[in-house]
Image (spheres, rainbow, N blue to C red):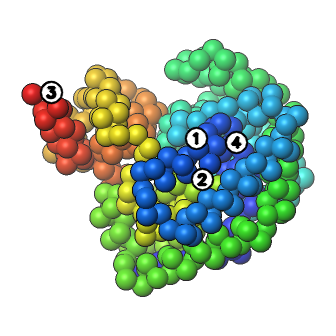
């Protein structure tokens, strides 16, 4: 079983960040929801109520940002699935287990008081996460401790020159960029405050659905069955809480000291999911043909192909794969991000280590589709 987080556990700063990410992605809620409606004719009335609320909040947020187009493009002009954005780099965004940073003044003071070495290490760590989903504790030796080394790290990244320029600018002038991002977050919080009652209404619907769901289903068994995520029992428990402005996502978080878990499992689930739009359904608006083409492109990449070949019959963790394939752990993490998003890899957790294993069922499905279509 798991606990349900009520409205009191909603972190407004995290949700404000997610609202800005949504605006920056430039794919409007309304357009996305229309695609779902075409594909799923039996979406619930609750789904429609929540989607209408989100669409209205998005419209109000866009009005507030009409004079901030350049800032939005600079800080949030990046797809959510690609990793961290420039705004998160500026704030050294630390996921979902930091203290609630609703006091922006003290947050800014804390960031600005970092020593040069600490700032370089933190920025270096976030650079690794910028283009990937990091699933393991980073090796201290991989982090840069001097400004020139961080700049070199940026220049060696496999990203566009424009992105490199943005990251260097944020690194060289951190205080200016932190203030800019915090002002955008403050605007988003203002819009959220205006729609506080509607947000509470969505959360209440979410709570009711998941309370009923978890009376019948163990949450860890559910994750294993639906997402191929195998987790050990956690003495701190498991909590399910809503993701309001990334409403079709599911993410799992836990704190670790490198040896053992030190917090509950926190599972953030999009508020739109219910019995007519379930978490178990792969959220996609395209036909399987397009999905198959995308996944075949992944298989055509030599490193990804070698990774899947290595873990087809046994599991392995990131540093093992890095050593075996002569790649860095950051590169392995980058490849795993794409393979996990495509469903071609399973993850298994043992104590604080994350292991990967090829999802042979999904690979067989892909190859069978090709066989039926092409032969």
Question: In this rendering, does residue 303 appear at all?
Answer: no
* C-beta proximity under 8 Å, tags 2 and 4: no
Q: Which mark is residue 80?
A: 1
Q: Residue at x 62, y 66 (%)?
A: 49
Q: Do labels 2 and 1 touch, CB within 8 Å? A: yes
Left or right: where 201 falls relative to 101: left
Q: Which residue is identified by label 3?
A: 374
Task: Mark yes or no: residue 275 visible.
Answer: yes
Q: Position of 39 compared to 367: left or right?
A: right
Mark 3 lies on a secondary structure that is helix
Residue shown at 33%/61% (left/top)? 226
Distance, label 2 to label 1, CA atoms, is 9 Å
Task: Report, in whole angstroms, how far the alpha carbon at label 1 lies from the one at label 4.
Answer: 11 Å
Count neighbours of disc 1 (C-alpha within 10 A) and say few if under 14, some if 14 to 19, many if 20 or more: some
Mark 4 or mark 3, which has the lower sequence index? 4
**x, y (%) of residue 71?**
80, 32
Q: Residues within 10 Å of mark 4 (few under 14, many from 20)?
A: many
Residue found farthest to the left: 375
Which residue has dot 2 on it? 246
Q: Relative to 169, does residue 92 appear above or below in the rendering? A: below
- Judging from the image, what secondary structure is the residue with disc 2 in? loop
Local crowd size for mark 2, using a 10 Å CA cut-off: few (<14), some (14–19), many (≥20): many
């Amino acid at each position: 079983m798991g606990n349900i987080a009520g409205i009191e556990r909603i972190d407004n700063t995290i949700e404000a960040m997610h609202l800005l990410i949504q605006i920056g992605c430039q794919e409007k809620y309304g357009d996305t929801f229309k695609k779902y409606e075409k594909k799923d004719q039996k979406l619930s009335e609750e789904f429609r109520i929540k989607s209408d609320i989100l669409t209205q909040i998005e419209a109000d947020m866009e009005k507030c940002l009409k004079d901030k187009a350049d800032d939005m493009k600079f800080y949030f002009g990046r797809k959510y699935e690609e990793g961290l954005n420039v705004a998160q780099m500026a704030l050294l965004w630390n996921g979902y287990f930091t203290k609630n940073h609703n006091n922006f003044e003290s947050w800014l003071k804390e960031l600005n008081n970092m020593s040069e070495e600490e700032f370089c290490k933190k920025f270096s760590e976030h650079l690794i996460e910028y283009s990937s989903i990091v699933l393991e504790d980073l090796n201290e030796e991989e982090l840069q401790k001097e400004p020139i080394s961080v700049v070199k790290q940026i220049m060696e990244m496999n990203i566009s020159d424009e992105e490199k320029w943005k990251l260097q600018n944020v690194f060289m002038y951190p205080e200016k960029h932190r203030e800019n991002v915090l002002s955008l977050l403050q605007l988003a919080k203002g819009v959220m405050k205006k729609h506080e009652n509607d947000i509470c209404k969505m959360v209440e619907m979410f709570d009711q659905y998941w309370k009923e769901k978890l009376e019948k289903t163990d949450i860890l068994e559910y994750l294993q069955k639906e997402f191929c995520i195998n987790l050990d029992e956690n003495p701190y428990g498991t909590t399910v809480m809503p993701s309001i402005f990334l409403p079709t996502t599911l993410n799992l978080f836990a704190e670790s000291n490198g040896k053992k878990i030190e917090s509950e499992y926190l599972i953030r689930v999009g508020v739109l999911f219910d019995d007519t739009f379930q978490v178990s359904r792969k959220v996609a608006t395209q036909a399987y043909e397009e999905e198959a083409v995308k996944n075949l492109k992944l298989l055509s990449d030599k490193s990804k192909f070698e990774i899947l070949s290595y873990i087809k019959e046994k599991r392995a963790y990131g540093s093992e794969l890095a050593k075996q394939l002569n790649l860095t752990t950051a590169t392995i993490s980058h490849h795993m991000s794409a393979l996990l998003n495509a469903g071609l890899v399973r993850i298994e957790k043992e104590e604080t280590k994350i292991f990967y294993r090829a999802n042979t069922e999904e690979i067989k499905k892909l190859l069978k589709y090709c066989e039926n279509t092409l032969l």
